[in-house]
Amino acid sequence: MIDSHVVLRIAKDKAFKLLIIICSGLMIVPLLLILYYIIRNGIAVIHWDFLFSLPRPIGEDGGGIANALVGTAMLIISASAIALPFGVFAGVYLAENRGSRISDAVRLCVEILQGVPSIVIGIIAYEWLVVSMGSFSALSGGVALAIMMLPVVVRSTEETLKMIPDTIREASLALGVSYTRTVLKVIMPAGLSGILTGSLIGIARIAGETAPLLFTAFGSPFMNTNIFKPVDSLPHIIFNYATSPYPTWHAKAWGAALVLVIMVLGFNISAKIVTRRWKVQF
Amino acid sequence: MESAVLTVEHFSAGFGDAEVLKDINLTVQRNRVTALMGPSGCGKTTLIRCINRMHELIPGATTSGRILLHDSDIYTLNPIIVRRKIGMVFQRPNPFPTMSIYDNVIAGYLLNGIKIKKSDKDRIVEESLKKAALWEEVRDRLHKKGTFLSGGQQQRLCIARALAMNPDIMLMDEPTSALDPKATAYIEQLICELKKNVTILLVTHNIAQAARVSDYTAFLYLGELIEFGTTEKMFTVPEDKRTEEYLSGKFG
């Protein structure tokens, strides 16, 4: 009687363990499928010319995505230049003033900001910058992406700095070091790997954003390095090529998708490496 | 020849409405070890954190009375200046995790942006580590991270870091409470060695440690200074009944 009960329980345990193993195993499937399709369809078009030349009109062979690569780089750099300083310092404040009402309010706003749909952020950037400056531009796209990136940077900075023991801060203050220098030279270096990881994950998050760019960076078939002018971007070029009626353009969309995925994976993997290599032991 | 380095006069401190220290009077003599002992929660840590102005970092902290370092009231000085003159060693070793052993020792100079020559740096590092009895163990790995050392070595590194600033007085907040008995014995031996040149105020909840290393002992109980005098006298003929009960293990 008791024996059969125990046997049943052991069997249930085994079944449950099997279930969670299968569920977690399934997590690998979508990524592998995505990579498989993108590589199978995209690898054929990737060559020197594809990466380093500009798009050609329909009917002409060849042409590439150089404009989109430069555009994406400009968008990422301008978004980072805005989001990193603001985000990191806001994160420092939140970590340093955990219980204050301002930090509770800021934390709440940052959480909500994270949930704002990207298309809405795009509209806001359009209203603010495109309308007031009279032109679509890389800058307006950068601002939209910066707003999307901020929550990730703020939260990861805060979480990282919260892990640093108070004793380290006290060691510095007890040596007669000012608060500013304690934060800049003791606390932030100790949290550098986490801050960098957060920044890389933030960049990975925005690199593939399309919606906010539709009416900010807009797109351009030309090589443009002026941040006040429209630029193309990888996600945007994928959208345009994939929705076109031409099979040669479809192939280009797959190629651009492959480049984008490799880029995003690169940011994510670097984030992992930074976390592991630069880990500070307390 | 006794001369006072630090004088605490009618000093009280607390958090908000809660008074943690009540009317403390105490004198710390030059090149002597003064022990602050008492049961947990008696205010010993608060007292030394008042002495280097760390107490006020906690929101709601209050103080009244005077603490004189030589002749100047530290509460009229800038806290940053006070903390440079008063070194502190904490309960748990806390070397800077991003710095090498070498940089940890001169952290007081590096972090404060005080420019010193390379030769002076080398000299300060060597002297401080020798004083902290750590030089022989780390001389060939000065540029490794301080956090790779053992707990006892880390604590001696923290002592070296405080010594490097040539403090007028060293505060030690239960410096051995996180260490094993062997490392504890080593630190105690070091304290006895250091007092030839350094004034030390040592917080301990370990009665035997106070007896072993200190010249003067102050007994704090529930925020009051019950008794203060030479260690020898307090451990042989305590004046107050509570001191006697504490020393004989009736409470604490």
Image (cartoon, coloured by chain):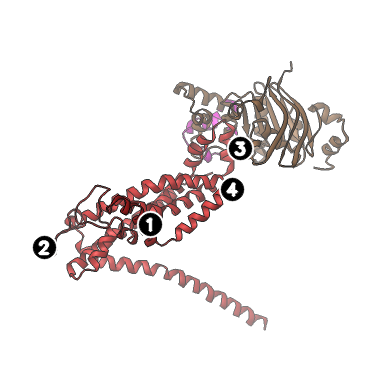
Q: Which residue is mark 2?
A: A60
Q: Which residue is mark 4?
A: A100
Of pointers 2 and 4, the one earlier in the residue sequence:
2
Lateral position of residue B114 relative to residue B31, left or right: left
Discs 2 and 1 carry the same chain letter:
yes
Q: Residue at x 49, y 25 (%)?
A: B114
Q: Which residue is mark 1?
A: A124
Q: Are marks 3 and 4 in contact (CB under 8 Å)?
A: no
Quadrant placement of the C terminus of chain B: top right
Disc on res. B152: 3
Q: Which chain is brown?
A: B
Q: Residue at x 65, y 41 (%)?
A: B180
Residue A203 shows in the view: no
Instruction: Return the chain for callout 1.
Output: A
The magenta region covers B129-156
Q: Residues within 10 Å of mark 1 (few under 14, many from 20)?
A: some
Secondary structure beneath dot 2 equals loop
Q: Residues within 10 Å of mark 4 (few under 14, many from 20)?
A: few
Q: Nearer the viewer, mark 2 or mark 4?
A: 4
Label 4 amino acid? Ser
How far apart marks 3 and 2 lie (CA) works out to: 74 Å
Magenta stretch contains residue B141: yes
Chain A drawing hue: red
Instruction: Return the chain for callout 3.
Output: B
